[in-house]
C-alpha cells in the first residue's frame, strides 16, 4: 500500500474515532449531530478538506456523486457551524501522533513558524476579516494563518487561524511554544516579525530553544536597545538586559542594564504598573551576506 493511501486511511479511521466522541467536539452536545443526517460530523469532516475552490453546491454534488439526496449549501453551513473550534486542531494533533517524525537535526526537531494571508468569500457582516477597499468598493475578506511546520519531517504541527484584523503573530508563536516542553528538544525558527521581548522571555522561562532573525543593529528593533557599535561587522556575542515596567525598579548605578516597557507592550511575566524585574539573556550572531549587508540572528544556544 502506498504511503499516501495508508495515511489517508489512517486519517479516516481517526475521524471516525473522534466523531464517536462528538460531545467533546460540538458546541451543543445535547443537540448537535444527534439525528441521523446526510452530513454527519464524520461526513462533514471528510467533505471540508476535499473542497477545491468550486462553488459549494458543485463541491457537494461531486462529493455525493450527483445523488438525488445531495445536501444543500444551507445544510452544510448549519452543520459546519455546530463544530467546536477545538475539533480540527485536535484532529491534526492526533493525526500527527500517527507520524511523530523521526528525522531530526543533531537530535533536535526544527519547527518553523510563519504567517500568511488568504482571501475568502466576501462577508461584510464579519468585522474580524472584512476590508473595504474604497468608499464605493464591495470590499473583501481575509483570514490570517500562523503555521508551525516541522522542517525535517515536512509536516504541519499546529495552526492558528483568525480574521486578518485580529492577527497577532507573536501571540500565536507563544501559544505554539507552550504546547512543548524542554524534553521535546525542539528549536523554534521564526522571522523578524516574530521578535519580541515576550517571545524571548517565554522561551527562556520554559527552557525552549530558538533561532529568530531580528532587525539588524542599524535599525530600531530590539538590538537597538544595546547600542552596539555599528562598525562591528560580523559578531558573536552574548547580550542581557533587565526588563521592567516601572522606572523606580531601575538600578540608578547601572541604568544601561535596564529596559522599561510601555504599558501597551505585551509581556506575560510583568503586568502594566506591576513592580518587578525580568532578567533576560540571549546570543547574537551577526553574519555578513554581502557588501555592507548583514543578518542578525538571536538564539539561546550558548557556546559550551
Image: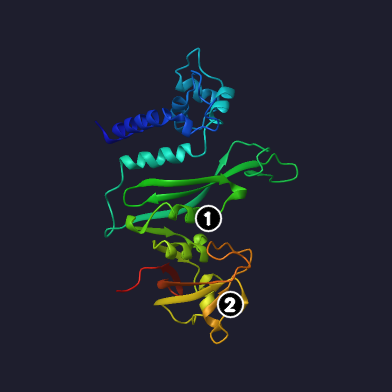
Label 1 sits on a secondary structure element that is: helix
Residue at image point 30% right, 47% down: 101
Q: Position of residue 130 (x, y in %)?
A: 65, 43
| Quadrant that contains the C terminus | bottom left
First in sequence, mark 2 or 1: give its number. Answer: 1
- The residue pinned by badge 1 equals 171
| Above or below: residue 37 compared with residue 247 | above
Left or right of residue 133: residue 236: left
Give yes or no for contact between labels 2 and 1 (Cβ–Cβ under 8 Å): no
Please determine whether, in this image, residue 38 is positioned above or below residue 222: above
Mark nearest the camera among 2 and 1 is 2
Check the image and name the residue furthest to the top: 68
Instruction: Kindly report the distance in space between the C-alpha atoms of the residues bearing marks 2 and 1.
Output: 26 Å
Q: Residue 127 carries which label?
A: none
Q: Name the residue under label 2.
A: 249
Q: Quadrant of residue 275?
A: bottom right
- The x and y percentages for residue 157 are 40, 47
Residue shown at 62% from the left, 65% from the top: 272
Q: Which residue lies furthest to the bottom in this view?
A: 253
Quarter where residue 220 is shown: bottom right
The crowd level at tag 2 (other Cα within 10 Å; few <14, some 14-19, many 20+) is some
Q: Residue at x 49, y 39 (%)?
A: 86
**Residue 187 screen position, x and y as percent:** 37, 59
- Depth check: 243 or 115 in front? 243
Mark 2 lies on a secondary structure that is helix
Is residue 219 something that shows in the picture?
Answer: no
Q: Position of residue 98 (x, y in %)?
A: 31, 40
Q: Residues within 10 Å of mark 1 (few under 14, many from 20)?
A: some
Colouring: rainbow
Residue 203 visible: yes
Amino acid at each position: 500500500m502506498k504511503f499516501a493511501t495508508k495515511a489517508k486511511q489512517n486519517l479516516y479511521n481517526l475521524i471516525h474515532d473522534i466523531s464517536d466522541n462528538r460531545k467533546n467536539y460540538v458546541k451543543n452536545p445535547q443537540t448537535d449531530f444527534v439525528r441521523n443526517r446526510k452530513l454527519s460530523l464524520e461526513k462533514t469532516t471528510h467533505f471540508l478538506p476535499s473542497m477545491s475552490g468550486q462553488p459549494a453546491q458543485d463541491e457537494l454534488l461531486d462529493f455525493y456523486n450527483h445523488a438525488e439526496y445531495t445536501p444543500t449549501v444551507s445544510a452544510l453551513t448549519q452543520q459546519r457551524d455546530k463544530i467546536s473550534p477545538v475539533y480540527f486542531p485536535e484532529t491534526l494533533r492526533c493525526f500527527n501522533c500517527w507520524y511523530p517524525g523521526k528525522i531530526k537535526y543533531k537530535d533536535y526537531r526544527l519547527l518553523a513558524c510563519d504567517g500568511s494571508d488568504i482571501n475568502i468569500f466576501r462577508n461584510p457582516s464579519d468585522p474580524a476579516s472584512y476590508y473595504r477597499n474604497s468608499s464605493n468598493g464591495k470590499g473583501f475578506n481575509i483570514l490570517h494563518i500562523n503555521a508551525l511546520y516541522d522542517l525535517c519531517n515536512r509536516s504541519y504541527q499546529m495552526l492558528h487561524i483568525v480574521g486578518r484584523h485580529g492577527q497577532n503573530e507573536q501571540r500565536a508563536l507563544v501559544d505554539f511554544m507552550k504546547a512543548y516542553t524542554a524534553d521535546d528538544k525542539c528549536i523554534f525558527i521564526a522571522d523578524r516579525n516574530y521578535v519580541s521581548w515576550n517571545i524571548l522571555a517565554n522561551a527562556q522561562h520554559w527552557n525552549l530553544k530558538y533561532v529568530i532573525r531580528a532587525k539588524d543593529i542599524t535599525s530600531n528593533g530590539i538590538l537597538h536597545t544595546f547600542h552596539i557599535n555599528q562598525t562591528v561587522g560580523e559578531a558573536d556575542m552574548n547580550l542581557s538586559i533587565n526588563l521592567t515596567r516601572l522606572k523606580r525598579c531601575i538600578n540608578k548605578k547601572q541604568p544601561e542594564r535596564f529596559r522599561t516597557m510601555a504599558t501597551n507592550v505585551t509581556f506575560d511575566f510583568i503586568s502594566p504598573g506591576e513592580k518587578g524585574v525580568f532578567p533576560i539573556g540571549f546570543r547574537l550572531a551577526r553574519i555578513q551576506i554581502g557588501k555592507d549587508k548583514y543578518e542578525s540572528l538571536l538564539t539561546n544556544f550558548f557556546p559550551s
